Amino acid sequence: MLIRRAEGKESNILTSISFAAKRYWKYPEEYFDIWKDELTITEEYINENEVYVADVDDKAIGFISIVEVKNDFQAGELLIRKGFWLDHIFVHPSFIGRRIGSELIFFARGLCRERNIGFLHILSDPNAKGFYESINAQYIEEVPSNIKGRNVSLFKLPI
């Protein structure tokens, strides 16, 4: 597996990976209407953030992105804090369970060390909570998601 910087022209493939990975958990289709914007990876997003792709046999099979939030802001009921966030980590369902996500996290930690970033904030899908615990992310609390009546877990990943 090779991890490399994403290119803007890969926005469609990264978007398809994010949707496929989310669908792996068999969420109701109406959730995808709500998640459409956050799961869509645009060329602009790739060009403005730290987005890295995991390739196997020259084929993108997962990706990770880190974003810097420059000021606190309110997202619905949730206050998003200033700092660095692990915005996305998605692995194509046919590669889930093969340590691709762990390798992407290992890569991200190295990148953050190079840039003197001490930790990443993470909003975790409920199905990914065990993954974040396995990489020693620190559970902070449950917070409201953008789907009414549903919570997600807030973690802090020490670098």
Image (tube, helix red, strand yellow):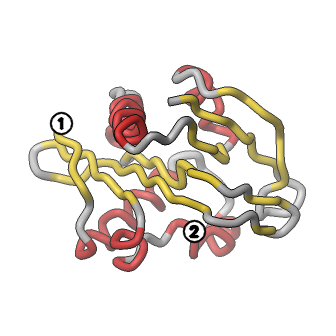
Image coordinates for residue 4, horizontal then vertical, percent: 21, 50
Instruction: Please tell me whether residue 26 is drawn above or below residue 126 in the rendered image.
Output: below
Residue sitting at the far front: 116
Q: Which residue is mark 2?
A: 38
As shown in the figure, which amino acid type bears the numbered disc 1?
Met
Residue at left offset 68%, top offset 57%: 82
Residue at left offset 65%, top offset 35%: 156
Residue at left offset 36%, top offset 27%: 99
Q: Give the secondary structure at mark 2.
A: helix
Q: Residues within 10 Å of mark 1 (few under 14, many from 20)?
A: few
Residue at left offset 57%, top offset 68%: 38
From where the camera sits, is residue 96 visible?
no
Q: Quadrant of residue 125?
A: top right
Q: Residues within 10 Å of mark 2 (few under 14, many from 20)?
A: some
Q: Which residue is mark 1?
A: 1
Image coordinates for residue 7, horizontal then vertical, percent: 23, 67
As shown in the figure, which amino acid type bears the numbered disc 2?
Glu
Instruction: Find the distance from the CA under tag 2 to the CA under tag 1.
Output: 26 Å
Along the viewing direction, whichever of 97 and 89 lies nearer the viewer:
89
Image coordinates for residue 41, horizontal then vertical, percent: 43, 70
